[in-house]
Image: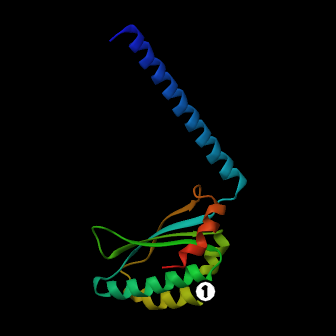
Amino acid sequence: MSVAKFFRNVTYSAVGILLVGACASFGEQKVLESSHTSPSMYSIFVIVNVKPEHREAFIEASELAAQGTVRAEPGVFQFHMLVDETNPNRFYFFEIFRDEQNLEAHWETENFKTWWGTVEEMLDGEPERVSTMRTVFPSSGGLEKQKPGLANW
């Protein structure tokens, strides 16, 4: 390799490293700015195990309740129900609420009480809250903008 080609490669590498570093710093600054300008939302992650003979009925009742939750509760911004890939009777719920008060209000709705009354006997053990979290991305404003599209299945 010629000396000129060597220095050109070193220069390109140095410029690349500087650009990556600048982008990372800019992105980091944007994350810090967005987390300070908009209060984060409250979210939970819950595991629910269902008796095998009730799996389909649980899914049906839960989908109906989830749709009602997203449509009727203005303080609910995400409501995800997932199934474990290796255990078809284990479900994960990831939910985002404006704040803890909206989660508590959710538990008091007729929609939730009807769902719970339907599925409680279907469960194999108690629901397990794995984590309580605060949102970082999308921002609260971004979640608010996404909400209208969630009710369109």
* Left or right of 118 on screen, residue 141: right
Residue 101: give x, y in percent of width and height.
Answer: 67, 73
Q: Estimate the x, y position of residue 37 in percent, counting from the top left.
A: 72, 53
Question: In percent of the image, x 52 and y 91: which residue is there?
Answer: 114
Identify the amino acid type marked 1: Thr
With 92 as the anchor, is 131 left or right in this view?
right
| Colouring style | rainbow
Q: Secondary structure at mark 1?
A: loop
In which quarter of the view is residue 39 placed?
bottom right
Q: Residue at x 35, y 9 (%)?
A: 2
Give the number of callouts. 1
Q: Viewer-proximal residue, 50 or 147?
A: 147
Q: Where 152 falls versus 28 (above or below)?
A: below
Q: Where residue 40 sits in the image (x, y, percent)?
A: 65, 59
Answer whether residue 107 is visible to the viewer in this image: no
Q: Is residue 21 above or below residue 81?
A: above
Residue corresponding to mark 1: 109
The residue closer to the viewer here, 9 or 62, is 9
Question: Height in image: 96 above or below 73?
Answer: above
Position of residue 116 in the picture relative to residue 121 (left or right): right
Density class for disc 1 (Cα within 10 Å; few <14, some 14-19, many ≥20) is: some
**Residue 95 seen in the figure:** yes
Residue that appears at 66% across and 62% down: 141
Quarter holding the N terminus is: top left
Q: Is residue 6 above or below residue 105?
A: above
Residue 145, percent across and down?
63, 67
Which residue is most to the right? 37
